[in-house]
Image: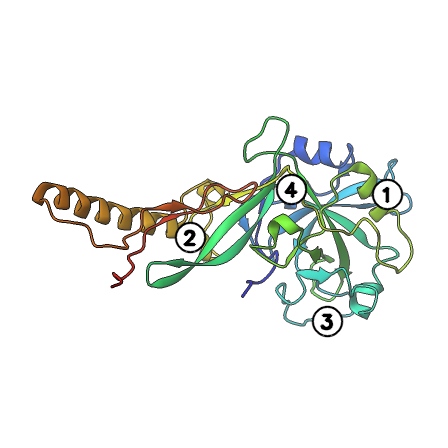
Amino acid sequence: APLAMCGRVRSTLGADQVAAASGGAAWKNPDQYEPRYNASPGASLAVIRRAESGESTSDRVVETMRFGLVPSFTDPGAKVDFYRMFNARSETIAEKGVFSRLLQQRRGVVLINGFYEWAAERAGSSQVKQPYYLHLEGKGGGSEGDVLRCAALYDRWKGGGGGDLVTVTIITVEASEPLRWLHDRMPAVLRTDEDVAAWLEGADDRPSSALRPYGEADMKWYPVTTRMNRGDFEDPSCCERTRRVAEKDAGSVAKLFSAAANKDEATGEKKPPGEKKPTGEKKRPGETPPAVTWSRTPATS
């Protein structure tokens, strides 16, 4: 079964990347931005929003917000739960009051490097939760790539003491066809400046046509360390390419059979009938090749 959608992102953007992705919009509070390779609800994210009257000479600003929506009507002094609404489904945002009231004035665009998803994969006799890092391939390629701009809604809560708490939820859509093997949902990626404008400048409470699955060839992914299964793991290696656990397991099994084959050749023993040679699985577009597997089948008479 798919794991929780879009609750972990990489948010390690520099000021130059934020400026380029926002069209040069002023960043109100960059001092509150804390870069994280493994950002979960509660972390700080850079968000483009429409400027309020008299706030800027531009029609947009960037504001650092906390990941996970805390509605403005939350009771004063209530315990904050960033995990309750860190995502909003595009299909229902116009129907659910907690989100629909934000569609006219509080649309945002979250800026991130990429996001993580998990697949349940078989490794030997056990099942592992294998994390993958998904990102846009930039002109130069590599994991830095282009900044991901994701449709979002934000709100301000004045009941926490110490000033406004500004929070944001990332909108999700159905996964594009190339990503359905991994999850049935994905962030609503706004790939073009036109998509960003269409979303930010919308002023009605109807879902936007900009909210659609993104599955073009520049969306890339690869497996990363299972240390990502810990929410508190924070290190640049979070998003470094590695081998899948299932592939490592298959590799060790392959070595075992290879050693056995060498022994057979040395002793002149025959291999059991029906023993299969390793076969490669079909490579998914954008993904490193999956494991090579061995299997033994019983001899038939």
Q: Which residue is mark 4?
A: 31
User: CB under 8 Å between callouts 2 and 1?
Assistant: no
Circle number at residue 226: 2
- Is 122 situated left or right of 191 in this image? left
Mark found first going from the N terminus, 2 or 1 = 1
Query: Which residue occupies 81% across, 48% down?
Result: 210
Q: Quadrant of the C terminus?
A: bottom left
Image disc number at residue 126:
none
Furthest toward the left, the residue is: 267
Q: Earlier in the sequence, mark 4 or mark 3?
A: 4
Please name the residue shown 51% across and 56% down the image.
Answer: 118
Residue nearest the observer in this picture, 36 or 99: 99
Whether the residues at callouts 3 and 1 have beta carbons within 8 Å, the answer is no
Residue 180 sits above or below residue 55 on the image: below
Q: Amino acid at mark 2?
A: Thr
- Near mark 3 (Cα within 10 A), the count class, few <14, some 14-19 or many ≥20, is few
Q: Amino acid at mark 3?
A: Pro
At x 84%, y 51%, the residue is 209
Of callouts 3 and 1, the N-terminal one:
1
Q: Which mark is residue 55?
A: 1
The reply to whether callout 4 and callout 1 are in contact (CB within 8 Å) is no
Residue depth check, mark 4 versus mark 2: number of the one nearer the observer? 2
Earlier along the polypeptide chain: callout 2 or callout 3?
Answer: 3
- Tags 2 and 3 in contact by the CB under 8 Å rule? no
User: At which x and y percent is residue 91?
Assistant: 77, 63
Q: Is residue 112 left or right of residue 236?
A: right
Q: What secondary structure is found at the residue carrying circle 2? A: helix
What residue sits right under mark 3 in the picture? 76
Q: Are marks 4 and 2 in contact (CB under 8 Å)?
A: no
**How many neighbours does mark 1 have within 10 angstroms: few (below 14), some (14-19), or many (20 or more)?**
few
> Looking at numbered disc 1 in the image, what kind of residue is underneath it?
Glu
The picture places residue 177, in percent across and down from the top left corner, at: 65, 51
